[in-house]
Image: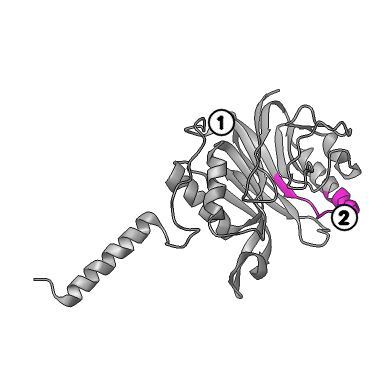
Amino acid sequence: MVTGTGVRLLVGALIVACMALIGPSTPDGARVAKPLPADAPKDFVPNRVMTWNICNPCNASGFNVGRAAEIASYAPQVVGLQEACVRDVERIRDHLRYLYGLEYHVKYGSVLQSWSRCGGVPWNPGGFGQAILSAAPMTDRVNEEYPDGGSEDRGYMAVTTLVDGHPVRVFNTHLAQRRQEAVRAKQTRVLAKAVARHDRVIVLGDFNAEPDTPELTGMWGLATDADPGCGPKATGTCEPTTDWRSKFDYVFLRGFVPVDHGVHLTQYSDHDPLHADVGQS
């Protein structure tokens, strides 16, 4: 016979087991899959990359489940996230794994330990900055803060991983906020110097600058945009990537050629995710 204490212990064990299986019961943690488009890939697209400023603070309840669904809708091999809190990225990665069967590796490029942005506790605030998710393992991570971040610390991270079956150096960056042109110009010089060391590079990020601005000159000298109609001259053909209809987000290619790309309107950030399919040059 099971005593009252034994019943309580059994029930408690069952609850713990259920929590381990389905995750926490908070709105953001509830693992309820959002439907994907009918043509969503069933597995990683090996030559596809994505960049997305996921917005902070924009973390309304349930956003990380929606963000995971946005990524799963296109299943890129590599995803670069900006304005990323470690806790949010952990949840996005978990949702991608348990709801959509996409097992990503993750590396972080935090530039702030920010209680105000990322919660946590005062003695252990959450890391804030960039993150890279990759279907293949990543090596040789570098995380660099720019000497001048402008009004907030900014930096870039880089890893070596596989895209389209080939080793590639992937950079992920977030440049200084708007109306800080001189700061961004210094940042792109630092970034371009690091990019120039590699023949096969993909640079992802939110550059906070339109294509024809002087601060992007150094990048255009090294790489091309995944949108073949978009370049350093103001032709009006660049697809906007923000709620205020500016082109701020880029996939720069060096040693690759653009095959396809798309900007996808989203409710989960003030920036839209941008994916690019690439080929060997």
Over which residues does the magenta segment extend?
172-187
Where residue 228 appears, as percent x and y from the top left, is 76, 27
Q: For residue 51, which quarter of the picture?
A: top right
Q: Quadrant of the C terminus?
A: top right
Residue at 69 percent of width and 53 percent of height: 143
Name the amino acid, label 2.
Gln
> Do tag 2 and tag 1 residues touch (Cβ < 8 Å)?
no
Task: Select label 2 or label 1 by which is in front.
Answer: 2
Residue at 51 percent of width and 55 percent of height: 91
Residue at which label 1 appears: 46
User: What label sits on residue 180 in the rendered view?
Assistant: 2
Local packing at callout 1 (Cα closer than 10 Å; few below 14, some 14-19, many 20+) is some
Q: For residue 274, which quarter of the picture?
A: top right
Disc with the residue nearer the chain's start (2 vs 1) = 1
Where residue 245 appears, as percent x and y from the top left, is 77, 43
Q: Quadrant of the N terminus?
A: bottom left
Residue found at the far left of this picture: 1
Name the amino acid, label 1.
Pro
